[in-house]
Image (tube, coloured by chain):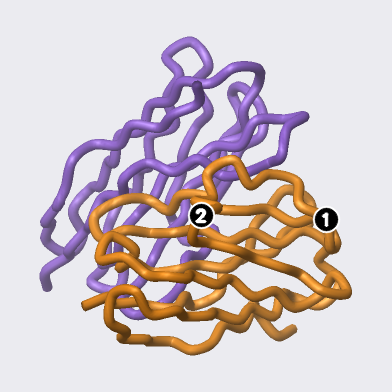
Amino acid sequence: GNSVTQMEGPVTLSEEAFLTINCTYTATGYPSLFWYVQYPGEGLQLLLKATKADDKGSNKGFEATYRKETTSFHLEKGSVQVSDSAVYFCALTTQGGSEKLVFGKGTKLTVNP
Amino acid sequence: EAGVAQSPRYKIIEKRQSVAFWCNPISGHATLYWYQQILGQGPKLLIQFQNNGVVDDSQLPKDRFSAERLKGVDSTLKIQPAKLEDSAVYLCASSFRETQYFGPGTRLLVL
């Protein structure tokens, strides 16, 4: 079946530190990959996505590259801010099906000033 | 553009009671999803609608959960009777071009 595995949290960083949140997946077919972010007290928001191998999604300084050979979609940001504190979810959908999102368990990020 | 609306935001009930959640998707979005997010886990799809027809309800506990989407717009999700393990956040989403947009969720606590 389809599944997503994220690195265990929580992750605590100082402002301006480099961020990596690892995400690997198992899927049949050719999935589209997503990162969603959930700020405290708010709903899930799409952060970025990639729909085919070697695509790079980017938004708000975050980047992730769809690596088919390693079945990975790691999230990176060069310099985090306090406002980036949130829970980050890696997810996939498979084409030709119901397009339901399959989520990882989420990684909580706290950025301290 | 208005986002996905959900109500209520919070609900506390006792086990064996019933509860209903409401969702209004983004205008024009034909596909609507209900997810259950248990604390510390990622959201899990309960049911997906395309207009007012069900596309996927394979993970919906049909002995106690039901959902409908009359007229292909608003949707309601009902739990009857509730169990302690139903305590979770219930998220509604609607989609356009493979991107799903989520509402703020309804946080349910079953005592």
Residue extending farthest top = A69
Residue A97 x/y as whole percent: 73, 32
The residues bearing labels 2 and 1 have C-alpha atoms spaced at a distance of 20 Å
Does residue B81 appear left or right of residue B101 in this picture? left
| Image: A111 above or below A95 | below
> Which residue sits at x=31%, y=58%?
B38
Q: Residues within 10 Å of mark 1 (few under 14, many from 20)?
A: some
Report the label total: 2
> Which residue sits at x=58%, y=68%?
B92
Q: Which residue is mark 2?
A: B63
For the colour orange, the matching chain is B
Q: Which residue is mark 1?
A: B53
Image mark 1: chain? B
The picture quadrant where one finds residue B33 is bottom right
Q: Secondary structure at mark 2?
A: loop
Residue A87 x/y as whole percent: 30, 60
Shown colour of chain A = purple
The picture quadrant where one finds residue A103 is top left
